[in-house]
Amino acid sequence: MTDSSKLSTPEGKSAELPMITGTHGPAVADVRGLNKATGIFTYDPGFASTASCKSAITFIDGDEGVLLYRGYPIEQLAENSNYLECCYLLMNGELPTPAQSEEFNKTIKHHTMVHENIRDFINGFRYDAHPMAMLVGTIGALSSFYHDSLDINDPHHREISAHRLIAKVPTIASYCYNRSRGLPFMYPDNTLSYVENFTRLMFAVPAEEFVPNPVAVKAIELIMILHADHEQNASTSTVRLAGSSGANPFASIAAGVASLWGPAHGGANEAVMNMLDAIHDSGETIERTIARAKDKDDPFRLMGFGHRVYKNFDPRAKIIQKMCHELLDELGGDQPLFALARELEEQTLADDYFKERRLYPNVDFYSGIILRALGLPMNMFTVMFAMSRTVGWISHWMEMHADPENRIGRPRQLYVGAAKRDYPA
């Protein structure tokens, strides 16, 4: 707590607004006492200027292009860590010791199987149902299968639910994928690593031996690390808001999946691929594409450039760009599309129009190409995002319930409807 500022109303009422500083980032004005002292609220559409909570999990400096998980730069984690180690870090605040890592991995593997009736549940969806529809419904239904750990006031129950979600969502995601393809659901193989197991669940069939491709495994693991958490975004805020009512962890995470499904949030890499496909199929030159993007009278805009938070280069984009090269050299994939993407990136980075507006490529610009190279249909892209982000959501949910200041979310509004009026006689 530092200095305070004072707000006065035309009616002569005033309130002291204490200023609170965190480890990083700007100070915030504590407005909790504002309404009681003055009778007014703040107005902040989208909560773009409002800190809705205190959190020690993730920090983003959009101007400098910095992303930290529990203080560790994303570049260092991507280079040296693995996804399950990042899960432990996000949940517990510290990197695990070798013994803790071994125990955590063992615990997650113990929970990778799902109740047999969940297979029947997924088979109840139409064969052509969107995988995200199946995912949000199935995660929401988990509380009916695992109701032995739903006491949100019990830290041990919260931890068990977190372990179950991290372990089971990849299995469920693979079943959603194979349901649409008419292929059998594979059982997990816990002799494999977390990501190796996921690739087997996705791509193996009972009739053939499956050997995970190490480059594909590395690419998926990198995508999952980069998407594990991203501070108070729309889906994370949704999880916190749903959880603040006392909703069970599976319902809360299902709410996050539903929020992620929106095209303005989790569907950005699909939009990138649709754009690249359209450019490639039309034969339009990159020069013409860029000219259209700069034309204010043309509705076309570049997808995968710029970010609501990052006003500098997205640090995740630099990391994933290198992985694109390695994966496509190994797998083949959409080489023409990748060459198109590289040319588009190079020309925009050299163009003053984009530099002045800080429209740099973001992580979605490359992640879609990687997922396409792995042979995934676009309707699975957001499922992969949700699977990666599960640990971030559950970490915030656990942090929220351990916070003594936690209370049910109840945003206010600026009412602009009809004034009070009488029903006609």
Image (spheres, rainbow, N blue to C red):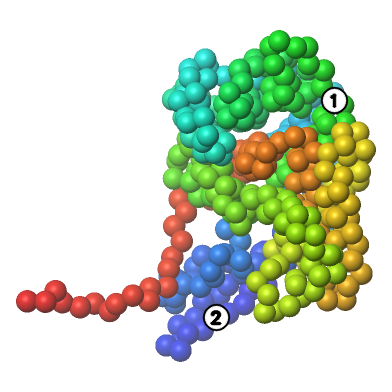
Residue drawn where x is 85% and y is 25% of the image: 213
- Measuring from the top left, give residue 256's x and y in whole percent: 56, 44
Residue drawn where x is 69% and y is 53% of the image: 274
Judge left or right: residue 64 versus residue 270.
right
At numbered mark 1, what does the secondary structure look like: helix, strand or loop? loop
Judge left or right: residue 183 versus residue 89.
left
Residue drawn where x is 51% and y is 73% of the image: 43
- Mark 1 and mark 2 lie on one chain; the one further toward the N terminus is 2
Residue drawn where x is 71% and y is 10% of the image: 207
At numbered mark 2, what does the secondary structure look like: helix, strand or loop? strand
- Measuring from the top left, give residue 356's x and y in whole percent: 83, 76
Cα–Cα gap, marks 1 and 2:
61 Å
Judge left or right: residue 420 versus residue 49.
left
- Quarter of the image that includes the N terminus: bottom right
Local packing at callout 2 (Cα closer than 10 Å; few below 14, some 14-19, many 20+) is some
Marking on residue 213: 1
Q: Can you identify the residue that label 2 sits on?
A: 7
Question: Which residue extends farthest left?
Answer: 425
Is the residue 398 above or below the residue 283 in the image? above
Residue 168 appears in the rendering: no
Q: Amino acid at mark 1?
A: Asn
Marking on residue 327: none
- Measuring from the top left, give residue 103's x and y in whole percent: 75, 19
